Image (cartoon, rainbow, N blue to C red):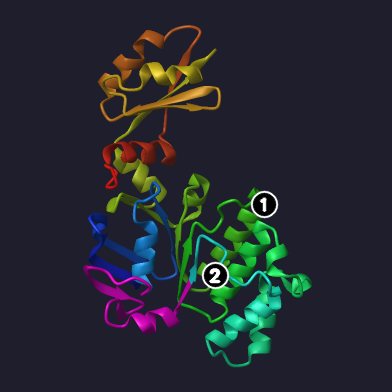
Amino acid sequence: MTLAVDVSGLNKSFGDKHVVQDLAIQVETGKITGFLGPNGSGKTTTLRMLCGLLTPDSGQGKVLGLDFRKEAERIKRQTGYMTQKFSLYEDLSIEENLTFVARVYSLDDRRRRVGDALERLGLENRRRQLAGSLSGGWKQRLALAACVMHEPRLLLLDEPTAGVDPKARREFWDEIHALSAEGLTVMVSTHYMDEAERCHDIAYIAYGRLMARGTGEQVIERSGLVTFRGEGPGADRLSRELAGKPGVAMAAPFGAAIHVSGTDRAALEAAIAPWRKSPFRWTEVEPTLEDVFIHLMGQSKDNFE
């Protein structure tokens, strides 16, 4: 297994807030790794340290075979980074933005490279449209085109599909998988569980600490969660009554149903026993990633509190 990212002991503080704490992460070349966790958990800070935009307080290891602390400038040249906020020039056209990016990277044969990027991301017919007039999905395509035009080996995506419609999100992920198949390593932070399931593996970070790592199936299996699904009239309203009872780690509505999870089966069954009768129907189900992540959030402490 060839590792594109192999770092350990990663720490970063801002004032008295320790936002990344002794983090170790390995990412296999050509894989898509999902970075998940609540807001303020250090996901963006970690991505920026890995590509050399932020200097860590401590840590060691390699990114793309280079010492990520001593050779940050070389890593930057081989990394594409797509920020949460659209960061290209809104008063320039799509083509002008890509040409500008090509100049920043001192790319040769710029006209061909810009043309290839326009064609790959389906932007050719809009090449003269101002970036500021694009919808969220088209801005996303333009930003991705700008990130990969210099042919990076590592692509970092920071919540790239926030506010984008489902069709555009699916098309975006199809392109990410196509890039991965060509050997590009991708790390993507997201809050969408369906996007987490599209990743080859995931890393769950809560307030600076790595709490789960592996494929989606592995993370679910290692959680030790037992989950029951309750259905019936008003089942979704039982969450308030069940939350906080012994054995209940999480009680959350799922449409008209409810998911109740915990790691102690006997205590969990005792908690739902008063409602385990008509008109309610209960079945044991496999926990979802969302069940697991809510459970992990309950085990972590917000370092800004």
Secondary structure category for the residue under label 1: helix
| Front in this rendered view, residue 49 or 170 | 49
Say if residue 1 shows up in the picture.
Answer: no
- Quadrant assignment, res 247: top left
Secondary structure category for the residue under label 2: helix
Quarter holding the N terminus? Answer: bottom left
Left or right relative to 126: residue 100: left
- At which x and y percent is residue 139? 64, 63
| Front in this rendered view, residue 135 or 77 | 135
| Front in this rendered view, residue 239 or 275 | 239
Identify the residue position indicated by label 1 in the image: 167
- At which x and y percent is residue 75? 38, 80
Segment colored magenta: 52-80
Label 2 crowding class (10 Å Cα cut-off): few <14, some 14-19, many 20+?
some
First in sequence: mark 1 or mark 2?
1
Marks 2 and 1: in contact by CB < 8 Å?
no
Label 1 crowding class (10 Å Cα cut-off): few <14, some 14-19, many 20+?
few
User: Label for residue 179?
Assistant: 2
Left or right relative to 28: residue 233: right
Quarter holding the C terminus? Answer: top left
- At which x and y percent is residue 298? 31, 36
53 vs 10: above or below: below
Of badges 1 and 2, the one in the foreground is 1
Q: Amino acid at mark 1?
A: Lys
Residue depicted at x 67% and y 73%: 120
**The stretch drawn in magenta includes residue 64:** yes
154 vs 256: above or below: below
Residue depicted at x 25% and y 26%: 264
